[in-house]
């Protein structure tokens, strides 16, 4: 009914001055988005979006943690998923390889490595030095590989660490992101939210490690700027907030960066 009413209103709408109409629409957008969301009091809205039942006690015990920060605070998003202009423009990968949505095998942007191939070529003794965390994709999850047109630009790409590869790290933001985001570490609060890869229909590959495995026997561990992560607090939608023994906040490095390091202790993980 609402949609039909809106269509009826559009059909009967008389445009006298297009510029005036656009100005009114922008004013309405500002009133709704900026005043009510960006500058407004969100009140209980975050709690409606994120089911904080499991995280409530953890958050309540940290006087410096404010859930509104996740909605209104300055942030940097470092995501492997597509579509994302940060991937296409090379910001995420700090590379000059630039492109756009493309059919499988014809991408001009950095695609990373295929997970199965990476697992087959992995091996050797555990390294004492740190390696760069790899960007990857799963070929089995890329639909219509032989289709000559783009059916869907959506790709659930990811960063991954293999068992036996020692510490793998990623530095956020990288040089390209610093320029693109006009990065200023002084405006960030040092909250680190990780969104983990999900499995189709909940069926994961053998030896796939989940967030639950982090606290179940040290199958894998994490550090942020050399500070050990002691817990991953589930805030819903596959998102977890990293926590150390002092709380949720992690200070930036001397260079103003956040070095996230992960080590998989499960040999076949």
Image: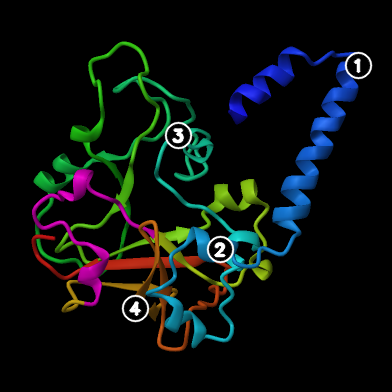
Q: Which residue is pictured at 17% across the width and 45% down the height? A: 118
Q: Tag 1 or tag 3, which sits nearer the N-term?
A: 1
Q: Are marks 2 and 1 in contact (CB under 8 Å)?
A: no
Give the labeled residue for mark 4: 231
112 on left or right of 87: left
Q: Quadrant of residue 129?
A: bottom left
Residue 30 at x, y = what percent? 79, 43
Q: Are marks 4 and 2 in contact (CB under 8 Å)?
A: no
Give the labeled residue for mark 3: 83
Magenta range is: 195-215
How many residues crowd around disc 1 within 10 Å: few (fewer than 14), some, or many (20 or more)?
A: few
What secondary structure prevails in the magenta region? loop
The answer to which of 132 and 37 lies nearer the viewer is 37
Q: Tag 2 or tag 4, which sits nearer the N-term?
A: 2
Give the labeled residue for mark 2: 46
Q: Tag 4 or tag 1, which sits nearer the N-term?
A: 1
Q: Tag 1 or tag 2, which sits nearer the N-term?
A: 1
Residue 17's label in the rendered image is 1
Q: Are marks 3 and 1 in contact (CB under 8 Å)?
A: no
Q: What's the CA distance linking mark 3 and mark 1?
A: 36 Å
The answer to which of 263 and 249 lies nearer the viewer is 249
193 on left or right of 204: right
Asked if one can make out residue 140 in the rendered structure from this viewpoint, the answer is yes
Quarter in which the C terminus is drawn: bottom left
Q: What's the CA distance linking mark 2 and mark 1?
A: 39 Å
Q: Quadrant of residue 207?
A: bottom left
Q: Nearer the viewer, mark 1 or mark 4?
A: 1
The correct choice, above or below, for 116 with respect to 190 in the image is above
Quarter in which the N terminus is drawn: top right
Q: Are marks 1 and 4 in contact (CB under 8 Å)?
A: no
């Amino acid at each position: 009914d609402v949609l039909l009413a809106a269509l009826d209103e559009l059909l009967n709408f008389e445009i006298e001055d297009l510029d005036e109409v656009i100005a009114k629409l922008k004013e309405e957008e500002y009133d709704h988005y900026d005043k009510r969301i960006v500058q407004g009091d969100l009140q209980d809205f975050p709690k409606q979006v994120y089911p904080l039942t499991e995280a409530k006690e953890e958050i309540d015990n940290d006087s410096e943690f404010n859930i509104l920060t996740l909605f209104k605070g300055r942030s940097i998003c470092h995501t492997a998923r597509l579509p994302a202009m940060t991937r296409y423009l090379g910001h995420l990968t700090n590379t000059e390889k630039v492109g756009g949505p493309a059919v499988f095998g014809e991408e001009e942007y950095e695609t990373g490595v295929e997970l199965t191939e990476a697992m087959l070529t992995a091996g050797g003794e555990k390294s004492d030095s740190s390696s760069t965390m790899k960007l990857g994709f799963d070929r089995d999850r890329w639909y219509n590989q032989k289709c000559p047109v783009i059916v869907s630009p959506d790709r659930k790409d990811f960063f991954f660490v293999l068992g036996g590869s020692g510490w793998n790290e990623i530095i956020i933001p990288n040089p390209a992101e610093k320029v693109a985001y006009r990065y200023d570490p002084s405006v960030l609060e040092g909250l680190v939210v990780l969104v983990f890869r999900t499995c189709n229909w909940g069926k994961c590959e053998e030896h796939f490690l989940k967030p639950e495995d982090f606290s179940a026997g040290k199958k894998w561990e994490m550090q942020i700027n050399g500070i050990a992560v002691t817990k991953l607090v589930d805030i819903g939608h596959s998102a977890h907030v990293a926590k150390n023994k002092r709380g949720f906040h992690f200070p930036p490095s001397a260079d103003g960066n956040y070095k996230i390091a992960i080590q998989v202790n499960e040999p076949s993980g």
